């Protein structure tokens, strides 16, 4: 039986601001830039945007009231809005909330918007995490530490190697070299990865995402309305999200099992599976994240993602091209919204030298928090 | 607080027994009066049954390294002289896991799965931080 929400909504517009170091920019100015590009892309007028979902950047002082600040700046009064904070899981989760709102008749065209001036405005990633008896007492700090715990355990349990993590960095950089909008475009080798300094062992510098200024925006509408707009509709075929908010109380917290739950739900809604996915945009705050996604999304078995990444399998031309725009590791760190933008462009077939030929379905994933939050979308071309 | 420039716990009604036990060289966790679940981190409510009542219960301090990382960058100025230092996720024999440090051993000598036991590091007159050291295999 077809899921009632399958293919009912579409992404009708995507846009991004300049990325990298954008002197003089602010989180809001970058968000507005991205919004303008997405609006132009869709052919909609600003007045038609009646839904606004935002993720405050690390440099957005207004925090949870980001939606008001952004609504004020964009000069719109939505009838559906929220600011959400699930880190890198947020944009894909917001596409889902947008689709629910559109399906419920509570909005017609919902803009999902992110902007951050983390490179020039000073990020917050270095701060101690947690509350109460924070683990910072023991020096456990930074986003890298969470993923390092994950990687260290994966290596101990499955024999995964640092060189295999390096394959992810190399693939993303290769793809970024084909993307004129990417921040880091100079190709790298596994040897470069190995020679890069440690950040949090077992993660080298080249296992880590960039810190970027930039913005991204995607616009969600009903599939029916999408057919009258400027771009070929890219259908939201499947949606899923899941969370391990128990943190350490979850016995498999380090393995982020919620990522599997999120993808399984998205596959089920789409009536598709890993064999149907032609290209994947897998959230990569750190290289280990991609390995976990490959396992949780069923592209390989648990523990086999390290060998899976060898031999160019996740590069363009391989069995499963991953992060074809360069990802957080090499395109720009945008909390996952650029993964959605790239997923849409791959489905439209407009990616030029980095286009996966005849790509008909893509998996887009996001994850955030301290290994807590996961969201997944299956997008397909009509 | 001269000499100790690192993050310290904020002592509260709720967590004081944990830190007082550490000062006395004991690792003590809350056991839920309603369901018996042993919980950590310190919390007012049991994450299993949401009960509030709990009895502070000494645990063995023994465990194993569940995951192990080495931090090469000082994310807090207090750790500037310590980098590279390790953080271990320790699986306690009694069930809960806690972040801590393995001390008394070079970083590269520690492996996931190694047996460890708690040691107590007085860093200020008020606060003693529980850390771990490698435990010789049981003969």
Image: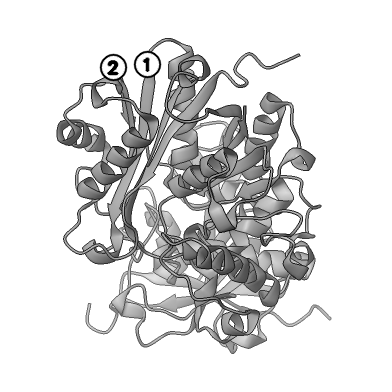
Identify the residue at image location x=58%, y=79%.
A193
**Which of the numbered marks, if any, corresponds to residue A79?**
2
Q: In the rendered structure, are the residues bearing label 2 and label 1 in contact, judged by CB atoms less than 8 Å apart? A: yes
For the N terminus of chain A, the image quarter is top right
SS class, disc 2: loop
Look at the picture and state if A243 lies above or below A10: below
Q: Residue A312, how many percent across, how many down?
A: 73, 67
Q: Residue B5, how many percent across, how many down?
A: 28, 77
Classify 10 Å Cα crowding around label 2: few (below 14), some (14-19), many (20 and above): few
Identify the residue at image location x=43%, y=40%.
B44
Q: Residue A213, how many percent across, how many down?
A: 30, 59
Look at the picture and state if A161 lies above or below A377: below
For the residue pair B127 and A264, the one nearer the viewer reads as: A264
Residue B26 showing in the rendered view: no
**Which of the numbered marks, if any, corresponds to residue A107?**
1
Identify the residue at image location x=75%, y=69%.
A310
Residue B103 showing in the rendered view: yes
Look at the picture and state if A78 lies above or below B2: above
Distance (Cα) linking label 2 and label 1: 7 Å
Identify the residue at image location x=38%, y=31%.
A42
Quarter of image, res A70:
top left
Q: Chain of mark 2?
A: A
**Scheme of image coloration:** one colour
For the C terminus of chain A, the image quarter is top right
Q: Chain of mark 1?
A: A
């Amino acid at each position: 039986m077809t899921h009632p929400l399958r293919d009912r909504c579409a992404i009708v517009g995507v846009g991004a601001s300049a990325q990298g170091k954008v002197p003089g920019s602010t989180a809001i100015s970058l968000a507005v830039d991205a919004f303008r590009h997405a609006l132009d892309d869709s052919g909609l007028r600003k007045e038609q945007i009646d839904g606004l979902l935002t993720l405050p950047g690390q440099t957005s002082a207004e925090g949870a009231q980001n939606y008001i600040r952004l609504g004020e700046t964009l000069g719109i009064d939505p009838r559906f809005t929220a600011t959400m904070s699930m880190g890198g899981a947020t944009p894909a989760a917001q596409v889902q909330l947008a689709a629910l709102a559109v399906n419920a008749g509570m909005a017609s065209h919902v803009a999902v918007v992110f902007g951050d001036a983390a490179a020039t405005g000073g990020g917050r990633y270095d701060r101690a995490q947690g509350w109460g008896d924070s683990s910072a007492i023991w020096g456990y700090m930074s986003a890298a530490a969470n993923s390092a715990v994950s990687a260290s355990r994966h290596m101990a349990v499955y024999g995964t190697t640092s060189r295999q993590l390096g394959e992810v960095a190399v693939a993303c950089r290769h793809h970024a070299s084909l993307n004129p909008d990417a921040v880091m475009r100079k190709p790298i080798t596994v040897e470069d990865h190995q020679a890069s300094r440690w950040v949090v062992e077992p993660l080298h510098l080249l296992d880590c995402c960039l810190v970027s200024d930039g913005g991204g925006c995607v616009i969600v509408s009903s599939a029916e309305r999408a057919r009258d707009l400027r771009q070929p509709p890219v259908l939201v075929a499947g949606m899923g999200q899941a969370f391990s908010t128990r943190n350490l109380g979850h016995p498999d917290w380090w393995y982020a099992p919620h990522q599997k739950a999120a993808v399984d739900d998205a596959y089920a809604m789409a009536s598709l599976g890993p064999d149907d996915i032609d290209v994947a945009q897998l959230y990569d705050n750190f290289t280990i994240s991609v390995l976990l996604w490959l396992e949780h999304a069923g592209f390989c078995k648990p523990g086999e993602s390290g060998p899976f990444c060898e031999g160019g399998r996740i590069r363009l031309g391989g069995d499963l091209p991953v992060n074809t725009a360069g990802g957080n590791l090499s395109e720009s760190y945008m909390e996952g919204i650029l993964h959605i933008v790239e997923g849409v462009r791959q489905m439209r077939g407009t990616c030029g030298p980095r286009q996966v030929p005849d790509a008909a379905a893509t998996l887009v994933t996001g994850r955030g928090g301290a290994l807590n939050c996961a969201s997944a979308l299956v997008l397909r071309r009509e | 607080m001269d000499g100790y420039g690192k993050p310290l716990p904020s002592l509260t009604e709720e967590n004081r027994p944990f830190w007082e036990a550490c000062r006395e060289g004991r690792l003590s966790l809350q056991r839920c009066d309603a369901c018996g679940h042993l919980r950590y981190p310190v919390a007012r409510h049991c994450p299993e049954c949401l009960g509030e009542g709990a009895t502070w219960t000494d645990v063995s301090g023994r465990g194993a390294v569940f995951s192990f990382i080495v931090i090469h960058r000082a994310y807090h100025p207090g750790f500037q002289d310590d980098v590279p230092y390790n953080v271990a996720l320790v699986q306690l024999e009694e069930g809960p896991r806690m972040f801590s440090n393995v001390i008394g051993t070079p970083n590269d000598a520690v492996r996931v799965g190694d047996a460890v036991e708690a040691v107590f590091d007085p860093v200020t007159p008020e606060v003693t931080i529980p850390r771990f050291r490698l435990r010789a295999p049981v003969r």
